[in-house]
Image (tube, rainbow, N blue to C red):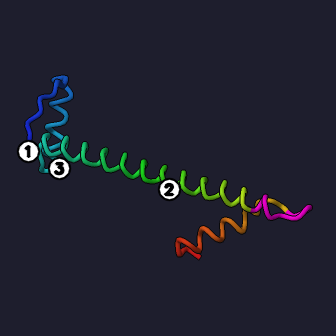
Amino acid sequence: MVKNLTLSIDDDLLDRARVLAAMKRTSVNAMVRDFLDREVRREAQLSARAEKWTRLFEAADTDVERRSRHSCEGEPLFDRGSFYEEVMRERGLL
């Protein structure tokens, strides 16, 4: 369903937007619609990326806790290189 939207735009900005739209053989309406679509998609991607990082850090914390319970004295509790390789293998990047 398509809805109408009323915007308040400075006359000069609207004139320049119309010229740009004409140069691109589109309309100001299509430009605004495309802009909003890109912004919503970008925000969703950023949110998904933040969620992945949160899961990654939670996995790292869990791994550190597990290793700390089973580590011997003198052995590092967390090996960043090993963890990186493990995550990259899980994602099929190594």
Q: Position of residue 92 (x, y in %)?
A: 53, 75
Name the quadrant of the C terminus: bottom right
At a point 17% along the width and 50% down the height, the residue shown is: 24
Cα distance, mark 3 to mark 1? 23 Å
Q: Position of residue 85 (x, y in %)?
A: 66, 70
At a point 19% along the width and 40% down the height, the residue shown is: 32
**Callout 3 crowding tier (Cα within 10 Å): few <14, some 14–19, many ≥20:** few
Foreground tag (3 vs 1):
1
On screen, residue 13 above or below 81: above
Near-viewer residue (29 or 41): 41
Cα distance, mark 3 to mark 2? 37 Å
Near-viewer residue (19 or 91): 91
State the residue position of label 2.
52
State the residue position of label 3.
24
Q: Which mark is residue 2?
A: 1
Near-viewer residue (56 or 32): 56
On screen, residue 69 above or below 3: below
